[in-house]
């Protein structure tokens, strides 16, 4: 809404009728307001922000992390099961103890192998209550280690390939949605422009119909026209008034939808200025396809789908044979009755662990999962190929339609000018008695049709133009990628 108020107060609007408080908007300004204030713009912005923070989280996971793990207090007073070695039996014995610990750990993931390096330090305190109560401290001043899965699935490697691609797709999906908002704004603009034009024509027809009916009455008095012609003029005047009421209702509905789409005040009156005939743009199919393959987020989505399917195949294949893990650490450790002694003369602590999990009998469960993943990969590749073909066909058809519509605007504009001239000439000839009612009605219908055709041609042109921008994310007027301005704004 701030952008809307700025536009209303600035001189860029071109016109602002103070008396009627009417906002005059062009197509370009409508698109700018929609990109800033519409609900669709809000959704697109928040979806991009969500993807941005997801990517930031991925990048943060590649950096060293510092973690504090602590158990401030852990108190027990209960009966615990213990083994009595003298009598060779298990007994329940009363115990009462207090435990506390804290430790710092620095971890660094390693994408190449899928393992994790770590450095940690720990201090723990334990006190047992009772007749033989005692207090102990145990410390690990420093411990350095490494752990990873052996010969198994490396999730870090796949994340390194997929996550940057996902963010790039999200970035271009945001630009795609912005261009889609331009398309929606163009549709809303011309819906209201059509309703306004029909209302204006209805007002003119009422005025013209009343005038012609009065002239008809005068000519009927002198027997210049028949009573049937006079009744036809009266019927035309009545029909013009009915058409005006219908046009007024249609205009209010279109106005309400337009204002709601732009998230403006509900009762804001708007007057639209039709854009001029656009300059001729030479867009070739080959150029449009090249930019679409490079910039369209759907092509990136296809790549992501294949990568994710390949990742699933890799994961299921490696887990279908056996799973192994490796853990090794070296450090120092000590136990004492007080904190200072717990850090004095620490003993070396070495830990090495290798574990295997080998499926002996699983009735083909893991093999079945691996086969399913391979089949899903084949289906994904075929689906991606079909999607790319469909996208390319959409680009080709849109470019061809755009080329046709450029010539269509010129022809409909010429037809509209001829129809207006012919209608005005027919009215003048009717007034002086050189044209009949049929000629007048035919000229009026041709004028209405020519006006509608011109607006439709303008709408089809701009819809096709913004659809090409959406499919290619390329500005063919400035000959630059739409992402360039976005990259400069966000520092990419």
Image: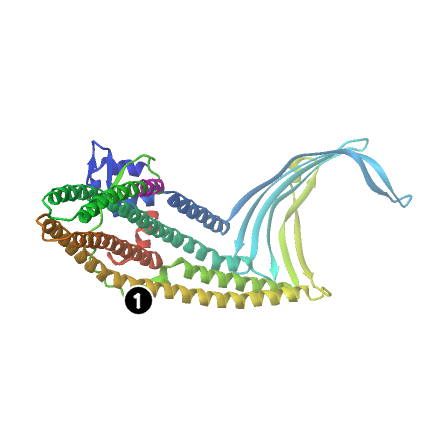
- Which range is magenta? 250-260
Label count reads: 1
Most frequent secondary structure within the magenta stretch: helix
In the image, residue 158 above or below residue 140: below
In the image, residue 118 above or below residue 126: below
Q: How is the image coloured?
A: rainbow
Question: Residue 42: percent from the left, percent from the top?
Answer: 39, 43
In the image, 386 versus 19, the foreground residue is 19
In the image, 112 versus 249, the foreground residue is 249
Q: Residue at x 24, y 55 (%)?
A: 453
In the image, residue 437 above or below residue 100: below
| Residue that label 1 marks | 285
Residue 255 among magenta residues: yes
Q: Quadrant of the N terminus?
A: top left
Res 422 → quadrant: bottom left
Question: Residue 77: percent from the left, percent from the top?
Answer: 77, 32
Res 75 → quadrant: top right
Question: Residue 175: percent from the left, percent from the top?
Answer: 36, 52
């Amino acid at each position: 809404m701030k952008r809307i108020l700025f536009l209303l107060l600035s001189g860029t609007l071109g016109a602002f009728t103070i008396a009627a408080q009417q906002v005059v908007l062009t197509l370009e300004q409508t698109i700018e307001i929609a990109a800033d204030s519409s609900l669709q713009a809000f959704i697109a912005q928040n979806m991009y922000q969500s993807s941005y923070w997801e990517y930031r989280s991925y990048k943060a996971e590649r950096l060293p992390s510092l973690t504090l793990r602590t158990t401030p207090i852990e108190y027990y007073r209960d009966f615990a099961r213990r083994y009595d070695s003298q009598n060779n039996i298990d007994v329940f014995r009363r115990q009462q103890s207090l435990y506390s610990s804290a430790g710092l750990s620095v971890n660094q993931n390693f994408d190449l192998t899928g393992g994790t390096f770590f450095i940690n330090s720990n201090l723990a305190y334990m006190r047992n209550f009772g007749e033989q109560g005692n207090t102990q401290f145990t410390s690990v001043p420093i411990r350095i280690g490494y752990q990873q899965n052996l010969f198994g699935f490396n999730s870090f490697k796949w994340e390194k390939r997929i996550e940057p691609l996902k963010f790039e797709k999200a970035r271009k999906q945001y630009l795609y949605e912005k261009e889609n908002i331009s398309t929606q704004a163009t549709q809303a603009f011309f819906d209201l422009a059509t309703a306004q034009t029909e209302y204006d024509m209805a007002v003119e027809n009422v005025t013209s119909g009343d005038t012609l009916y009065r002239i008809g009455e005068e000519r009927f008095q002198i027997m210049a026209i028949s009573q049937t012609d006079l009744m036809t003029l009266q019927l035309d005047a009545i029909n013009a008034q009915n058409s005006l009421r219908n046009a007024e209702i249609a205009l209010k509905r279109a106005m309400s939808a337009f204002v709601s789409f732009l998230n403006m005040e509900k009762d804001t009156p708007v007057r639209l200025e039709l854009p001029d005939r656009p300059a001729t743009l030479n867009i070739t199919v080959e150029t449009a396809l090249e930019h679409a393959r490079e910039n369209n987020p759907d092509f990136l989505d296809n790549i992501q789908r294949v990568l994710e399917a390949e990742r699933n195949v890799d994961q299921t294949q490696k887990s279908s044979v056996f799973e192994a893990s490796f853990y090794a650490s070296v450090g120092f450790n000590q136990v004492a009755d007080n904190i200072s002694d717990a850090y004095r003369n620490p003993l070396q602590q070495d830990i090495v662990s290798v574990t295997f999990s080998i499926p002996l009998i699983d009735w083909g469960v893991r093999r079945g999962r691996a086969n399913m993943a391979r089949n899903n990969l084949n289906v994904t590749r075929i689906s991606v190929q079909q999607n790319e073909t469909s996208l390319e066909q959409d680009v080709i058809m849109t470019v061809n339609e755009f080329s046709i519509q450029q010539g269509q605007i010129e022809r409909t504009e010429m037809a509209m000018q001829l129809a207006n001239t012919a209608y005005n000439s027919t009215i003048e000839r009717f007034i002086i008695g050189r044209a009949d009612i049929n000629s007048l009605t035919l000229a009026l219908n041709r004028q209405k049709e020519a006006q509608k055709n011109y607006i439709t041609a303008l709408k089809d042109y701009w819809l096709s133009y913004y659809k090409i921008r959406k499919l290619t994310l390329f500005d063919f007027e400035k000959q630059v990628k739409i992402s360039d301005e976005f990259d400069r704004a966000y520092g990419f």
